[in-house]
Amino acid sequence: MRAGRTWQIVAAMLVSATPLLAQTDLCLHRSVAVNVFDSRGETVPGLIAENFQASLRHQSIKILSVTQSSAPRVVIVLDASATVLGEKSEWEFSIGSARQLSDTLPRRASLGLIVFSSSIEKTISLTNDRQAIATELDRLKTGRRALISGTRKTALWDAMGQALLLFGPPQAGDALYVISDGLDKTMRLQLRNFERSMGTVRVFALVADPYPNAAPASGIGEELLRLAADSGGSTLIVSTEPSVERDDPVFAPFEPRPYFSRVLTGGQIAGAKEVQFRQIESFYEVDVQLPGRLEKTSKWSVNATVGTESSSRGLNVVYPKQLRACEILNPSTETAP
């Protein structure tokens, strides 16, 4: 398979199970995952269609239904490049974070795993068998030294593109959980092609590095931040060096400080990961009817109101920031770049 054409294969699979007669409806009718948090960062339960408002280019979007869900399909995308494996603490942090997500997700949620460096090294398809995931993660943890050999770079978008294939036809709430240091840039699949293929899949990332502020901001790190936010997901940037404190000079070697306000250390990390896990596992599946076909990918807005609280007064609504164009949802009309 040519990596440069992976996006086409992914996009085709996302609609392969959709009858031809339903392709127009696929454009007008969308299902998206939406999270709603109160001012304390807690999930707001029990919302219905009347609690939501949506608009596109100043036109109202009809909210058809709202269903609370806690059974997402999630694929862990685990970076096993040389820079991650080189530090035992960093590798154990990555494996431990993957185990935490596996243990946190409800049993009816489906979980898959892709391990990658310069290429894909291990794939476990979506399954409810958590023991299979746990066994593989334990093997990776104890077998760290055996893995450190050869050229092991970070083909991140390639791995994420392959992870999309595990979902097949999309479902609201599908998510990638990317654990990486985001340092190398050797991928063949371009970011723009990955974005065209991802549909409604949310991206959550844990960018781990002992000293994330000891070098200029990584291009991949910045791209992940944007991609995750736009998809309705989130990114955590953490220091895996336990001795580092926020006032350590290592966090300010450059002006302006590239990551200072975003790097998590010490006790901040556990709480932030718990919030991220809740966002992955519990969400509202919101079905909407668009006022017309989208000829290009467009920004839209989703707001929520609960009693006297609203999106402008304390409520935080997290959702995919853009709606894909109809031609992207029906890739058979596209040509290769």
Image (tube, helix red, strand yellow):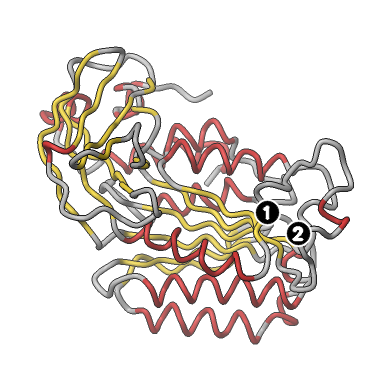
From mark 1 to mark 2, how far is it between C-alphas? 8 Å
User: Eyeballing the image, is 123 above or below 206?
Assistant: below
- Disc 2 element: loop
**Residue at the spot x=73%, y=81% of the render?**
146
**Residue at the spot x=81%, y=36% of the render?**
256
> In terms of depth relative to the viewer, which is nearer, 202 or 138?
202
Q: Which residue is mark 2?
A: 246
> Which label lies toward us, 1 or 2?
2
- Disc 1 element: strand
Tell me which corner region of the image, top left, top right, bottom left or bottom right, holds residue 319: top left
Q: Which residue is mark 1?
A: 263
**Residue at the spot x=14%, y=36% of the render?**
19
> In terms of depth relative to the viewer, which is nearer, 68 or 272?
272
Tell me where residue 250 appears, x and y as whole percent: 86, 56
Tell me where residue 47 appears, x and y as whole percent: 16, 48
Mark 2 is surrounded, within 10 Å at the Cα level, by few (under 14), some (14 to 19) or many (20 or more) other residues, namely some
Tell me where residue 263 appears, x and y as whole percent: 68, 54
Tell me which corner region of the image, top left, top right, bottom left or bottom right, holds residue 287: top left
Q: Image check: 246 left or right of 44?
A: right
Q: Which mark is residue 58?
A: none
User: Eyeballing the image, is 219 above or below 69?
Assistant: above
Callout 1, which amino acid?
A: Val
Mark 1 is surrounded, within 10 Å at the Cα level, by few (under 14), some (14 to 19) or many (20 or more) other residues, namely many
First along the sequence among labels 1 and 2: 2
Do the residues under discs 1 and 2 have CB atoms within 8 angstroms? yes
**Residue at the spot x=50%, y=64% of the render?**
273
Q: Image check: 216 left or right of 284?
A: right
Q: Image check: 41 left or right of 99?
A: left
Count numbered badges in the picture: 2
User: Eyeballing the image, is 92 above or below 76?
Assistant: below
Callout 2, which amino acid?
A: Arg
Tell me where residue 73 appears, x and y as whole percent: 32, 59
